[in-house]
Image (cartoon, rainbow, N blue to C red):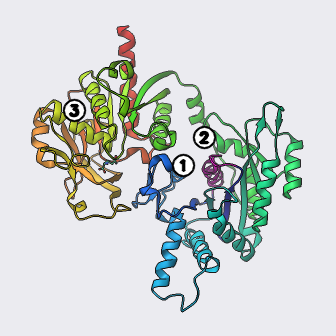
Amino acid sequence: MNTKYVFVTGGVASSLGKGIIAASLGKLLQARGLRVTIQKFDPYINIDPGTLNPYEHGECYVTDDGAETDLDLGHYERFLGVRMSQANNVTTGRIYWTVINRERQGAYLGKTVQIVPHVTDEIKRRMLLLGKSGNYDVIVTEVGGTVGDMESQPFIEAIRQLQWEMPEEDLMSIHLTLVPYLHAAQELKTKPTQHSVQTLQAAGVHPDIIVCRTEMELSQEIRRKVALFCNVKPGHVIQSIDAPSIYQVPLNMEAEGLDEMVLEHLGIQDAQEPDFTHLKRFLDKLFHPKREIDIALVGKYVELQDAYKSILESFVHAGTVNECKVNAHTFQSEHLNASNLEEKIGKMDGILVAPGFGERGLEGKVLAIRYAREHNVPFFGVGLGMQMCVVEFARNVLGLKEAHSAEVNPSTPHPVIDLMEQQKSTTVKGGTMRLGAYDCKIKEGSLAHRIYGTNMISERHRHRYEFNNAYLDQMEAAGLKATGKNPETGLVEIVEIPTHPFFIGVQFHPEMKSAPEKPQPIFVHFVQAAMKKRQQNEKNC
Ligand code: GLN
């Protein structure tokens, strides 16, 4: 069988959940026994989202191979359990970078370099690249942005050309739109969908299936109307109704027959019957928790949920396995101060201090960590959250009042977090951090060892600064232990306070590898520690 390609485009509005639809389709096809991966093409000019402020584009998701990618790749991994790589996320910037470098090398042999064919050829090459490996039966490609955007045009043109070049049964196109409900008129409106499909068709791409996001059930009549005016087969207009959890969406899509339609179009006849026992069991537990806990998520980008997407999803996974609903309350660290701390986070069952960059809100993070340490509240620091727990310990336990991270105070007399040696000569910001999977050796008898149940792990990284080993002996003597280190470089990856009920900071990003079927162990144990704390609090009341 030839590798099959499914393209997912979006129209009417952004944030309709194209990534979730692509991931759900991938999951359905995988459950049918097919080898599937998903890739995302983003129409912005940044080479990757690594240099983007999370307010602009949500979390930057890091892969094992160190690619800084769009957060939708996190959904793809969580849904499919398939490892993503640099090849799974391509931006306009990366396409142009390749084309322009090629031009400088003289590879275009004196030709004028143009969007068509040179840029579109490079887009097509990348669209087909993963399929060439022979590792996959189906490649689902999500095109970022909305149809009609100026910057999406070369991608849509590339799909048009592929549609023309490839056998019909090897490629198909799915268009996701919005069917809004007008409360005043009490009516669902299909006109925006019609316009969006017209725009797509004007660019030469014909959708085979239209998925309509909606708050209300779409009647047969509405579906028929959309099919008629958008020129797709009757029955090929399906709904994606608001779901209580993103993990419900694959089952909703299956109920709408999405996988059947895709298999039929792609001429795949021997697909097995899907088995969703695991997913259904997960959802059942998710929707029927036996208890709940309140966790403070202390960070800098809390106004935008997407900024901490993987952390929030990890809580869903870890909560579900513990049959516990995790209410993650976000706190803007900038707004925490000594006088409001108790009132704001005093009732929380656990405190997670988030990763991040830069100075804003750091003192609030230090205060929250001190509170957790002194009040025996379960604490989990990730990335910058770990670094700040080292700063807090240095200042308030070792008495090094001016201790800081060199990231915000390069002239501190006590850089307990310092720039990594190999970063000192780096001036370029993009793609130059310590990125991707690194091994970590864990000390036996530590909390980390109990959590992971092994002494060698691999987790993903994205940072420039590190625990300064010059302070290690002092810290350990005073009770903050380094229990996880990189075996080659000796970089400290995990710190903990063994005398505290649960206090752990990790330099890496464990949240990037959590999935419903494989909840991340630190999150699982953190939730358990918070459940215990909650029980104690209830007893004391
Ligand atoms: N800003 C810090 C660094 O670069 C921490 C980054 C992070 O949270 N991963 O080291």
Helix, strand or loop at mark 1? helix
Helix, strand or loop at mark 3? loop
Circle 3 crowding by C-alpha within 10 Å: few under 14, some 14–19, many from 20: many
Residue at the bottom extreme of this rendering: 109
Q: Which mark is residue 75?
A: 1
Query: Can you give x and y, in whole percent of width and height, for residue 200 in the image?
Result: 75, 61
- Residues drawn in magenta: 13-33
Q: Which quadrant holds the C terminus?
A: top left
Magenta stretch, main secondary structure class: helix
Query: Can you give x and y, in whole percent of width and height, for residue 225 in the image?
Result: 88, 48
- Mark 1 or mark 2: which comes first in sequence? 1
Q: Amino acid at mark 3?
A: Ile
For mark 3, what is the residue? Answer: 497
- The answer to whether mark 1 and mark 2 are in CB contact below 8 A is yes
Q: Amino acid at mark 2?
A: Ile
For mark 2, what is the residue? Answer: 246
Marks 3 and 1, Cα distance to the nearest angstrom? 33 Å
